[in-house]
Amino acid sequence: MDTNKLILHAPWEEVKERIKERNIGLTDEDLAYSPGHEAELLERLARKMNRTHEEVRQFVESVSYNRDVAS
């Protein structure tokens, strides 16, 4: 399995806003993403959130999957 590949169940803009709601310290720059550049996003967030690359990938995917569910 490619650990750099993100499986998103919602548009990135929605996911980004949900992530910002849960992590107030993250900025639009931290969450800048374009398809094909998943590795850069995951590494940046891993550093910022003090988590592993895999933890961040799982977090982002879970946020994208859980539409309209409170954290």
Image: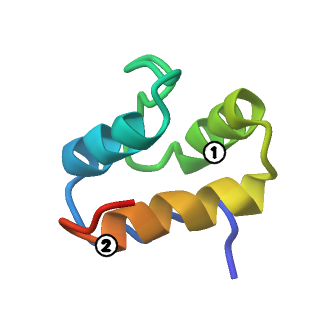
Secondary structure under badge 2? Answer: loop
Q: Is residue 67 left or right of residue 30?
A: left
User: Which color mode does the image show?
Assistant: rainbow
Residue 58: x and y in percent read 60, 67
Separation of disc 1 and disc 2 at Cα? Answer: 19 Å
Q: Quadrant of residue 10?
A: bottom left
Q: Which residue is mark 2?
A: 66
| Point 30% across, 62% down: residue | 70
For the point 34% across and 64% down, which residue is it? 64
- Residue 24: x percent and y percent? 45, 26
| Vertical side of 28 occupied by 57: above or below | below
Mark 1 vs 2, N-terminal side: 1
In the image, taking residue 26 as reference, residue 10 lies left or right, namely: left
Task: Tell me the quarter of the image containing the N terminus.
Answer: bottom right
Three-letter code, disc 1: Leu
Q: Is residue 58 above or below residue 39?
A: below
Residue 29 horizontal side relative to residue 39, left or right: left
Most extreme residue toward the bottom, as rendered?
1
Residue 54, image quadrant: bottom right
Q: Are marks 1 and 2 in contact (CB under 8 Å)?
A: no
Q: Residue at x 52, y 42 (%)?
A: 37
- Label 1: which secondary element: helix
Circle 2 residues within 10 Å: few <14, some 14–19, many ≥20: some
Q: Is residue 63 left or right of residue 41?
A: left
The spot of residue 19 in percent (x, y) is 40, 43
**Depicted 42 relative to depicted 25: above or below:** below
Q: Nearer the viewer, residue 35 or 21?
A: 21
Question: Residue furthest toward the front?
Answer: 70
Disc 1 designates what residue? 42
Residue 47 or residue 6, whichever sits in front: 47
Q: Quadrant of the C terminus?
A: bottom left
What amino acid type should be assigned to the residue bearing mark 2? Asn
